[in-house]
Image: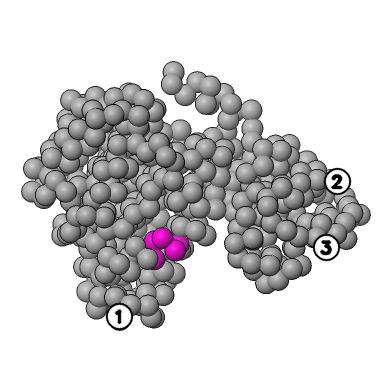
């Protein structure tokens, strides 16, 4: 497997577009399209929040009940959440309009929205945007990049990736884009994520791979502890790579899963590092845990701790905050047998062991914690399981951004 340039248009048969529709923002692209020239198998994971946005309900129905999918239309700025029947009618209207323009069935069109909760979408602007998207779609890298930029809200950078891998003796390609910066505490996947691939794989195996993957990728990130109403992760597979259909586990399925995990982990880290107001990517790596599930619980507890995140922002080697977060996670362990380390490109320092603080240099610790990517390693000495979670530091700007979000 190799990483290549590009995003959602990298795989054969996929086109994209990003246009300005003035849904909420002015003078920027705010609607995106992803389209396959042929029908696709589709899989998805969605928010665990009981309050689900209209597009989540629409897409879940398409994933579960439609014979195939072929297009995704996305808007940023307004979430179409808590909008009642009017919100669902808007999803239907979007699917109908795009379906007619592209000559595909309404139930093959997926819909996604991100932005302010509680506001109704301006359907006239959405419809005009859909017409622009259909006219602008292309298979070029530039078109994929336009789409990646159009789904951003408070994101400071666009997020996309593409890889190639071998399946059945054929070269297959996977491309992806996502957005997410605030209201990130997925318990299923991410804010919005779209993955395209030309591999030939059955719907059942596609869903199996995706559902298994998010447990150790998108489900291991947190920016602020808030699970969005709109979380949606979709994978479209159109089969144009020409490999024999993947219908069971085996070498080809493993190669697909490896590529999928590389893509989702890359994007998860990008989202965590681009958290609202963040100055660095904060990684918690738990090793030596009694079980994989306990390792996940421990790692997530550390990156979700507001005090731990504040310590990272202040470059403060206050190991008690990280140990405390491990302690209230719900996992059982002996605190006298835990080793804590700080690690970054500036080096690694042993900060806590045998139940007491180690003899370390505060200056060295501060230097390590001042890098743009910082890892806290916790060795539990209870087994061989490990897990990694990703978050970001907690800065003053997080409050400023969210206090002014609707302005």
Q: For the C terminus, which image quadrant?
A: top left
Going from the N terminus, do you reach mark 1 or mark 2 first?
1
Residue designated by label 3 = 337
| Residue 122 drawn in magenta | no
Q: Is residue 179 visible?
A: no
Mark 3 burial class by Cα count in 10 Å: few <14, some 14-19, many 20+: some
Nearer to us of marks 1 and 2 is: 1
Q: For the N terminus, which image quadrant?
A: bottom left
Res. 362 mark: 2
Q: What colour scheme has been applied to the protein in the rendered image? A: one colour
Q: Is residue 151 visible?
A: yes
* Mark pair 3, 1: CA separation: 47 Å
* Mark pair 1, 2: CA separation: 54 Å
Residue stretch in magenta:
209-213
Nearer to us of marks 2 and 3 is: 3
For the view shown, which residue lies furthest in the top direction?
407
- Secondary structure found at label 2: helix
Judge by depth and name the residue closer to the eye, 402 or 146.
402
- Residue at 28% of width from left, 29% of height from top? 84
Residue 311 horizontal/vertical position (percent)? 73, 39
Going from the N terminus, do you reach mark 2 or mark 3 first?
3
- Residue at 17% of width from left, 41% of height from top? 95
Main SS class of the magenta portion in the image: helix
Judge by depth and name the residue closer to the eye, 5 or 133.
133
Mark 2 burial class by Cα count in 10 Å: few <14, some 14-19, many 20+: few
The quadrant in which residue 28 appears is top left
Residue 247 horizontal/vertical position (percent)? 29, 75
Q: Specify whether 125 is left or right of 345.
A: left
Judge by depth and name the residue closer to the eye, 161 or 324.
324
Mark 1 burial class by Cα count in 10 Å: few <14, some 14-19, many 20+: some
The quadrant in which residue 273 appears is top right
Residue designated by label 1 = 168
């Amino acid at each position: 497997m190799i990483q290549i340039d590009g995003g959602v248009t990298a795989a054969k048969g996929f086109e994209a577009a990003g246009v300005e529709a003035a849904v909420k923002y002015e003078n920027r692209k705010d609607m995106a399209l992803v389209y396959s020239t042929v029908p696709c198998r589709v899989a998805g994971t969605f928010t665990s929040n009981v309050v689900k946005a209209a597009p989540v309900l629409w897409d879940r129905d398409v994933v579960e009940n439609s014979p195939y999918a072929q297009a995704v239309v996305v808007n940023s700025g307004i979430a179409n959440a808590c909008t009642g029947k009017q919100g669902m009618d808007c999803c239907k209207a979007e699917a109908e309009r795009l379906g007619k323009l592209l000559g595909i069935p309404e139930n093959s069109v997926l819909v996604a929205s991100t932005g302010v909760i509680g506001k109704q979408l301006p359907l006239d602007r959405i419809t005009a945007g859909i017409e622009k998207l259909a006219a602008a779609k292309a298979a070029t890298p530039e078109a994929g990049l336009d789409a990646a930029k159009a789904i951003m809200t408070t994101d400071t950078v666009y997020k996309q990736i593409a890889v190639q891998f071998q399946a059945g003796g054929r070269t297959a390609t996977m491309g992806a884009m996502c957005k997410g910066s605030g209201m990130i505490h997925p318990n299923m996947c991410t804010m919005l994520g779209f993955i395209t691939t030309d591999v030939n794989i059955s719907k059942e195996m596609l869903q199996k791979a995706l559902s298994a993957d998010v447990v150790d990728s998108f489900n291991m990130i947190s920016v602020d502890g808030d699970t969005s109403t709109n979380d949606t992760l979709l994978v479209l597979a159109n089969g144009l790579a020409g490999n024999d259909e993947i219908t069971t586990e085996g070498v080809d399925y493993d190669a697909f899963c490896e590529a999928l995990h590389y893509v989702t982990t890359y994007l998860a880290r990008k989202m965590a590092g681009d958290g609202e107001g963040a100055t660095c990517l904060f990684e918690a790596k738990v090793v030596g845990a009694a079980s994989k599930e306990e390792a996940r619980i421990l790692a997530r507890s550390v990156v979700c701790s507001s005090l731990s995140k504040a310590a990272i922002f202040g470059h403060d080697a206050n190991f008690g905050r990280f140990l405390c977060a491990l302690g209230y996670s719900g996992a059982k362990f002996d605190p006298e047998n835990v080793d804590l380390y700080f690690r970054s490109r500036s080096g690694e320092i042993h900060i806590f062991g045998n139940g007491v603080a180690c003899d370390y240099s505060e200056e060295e610790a501060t230097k390590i914690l001042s890098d743009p990517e910082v890892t806290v390693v916790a060795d539990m000495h209870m087994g061989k399981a490990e897990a990694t979670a990703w978050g970001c530091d907690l800065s003053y700007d997080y409050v400023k951004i969210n206090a002014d979000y609707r302005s």
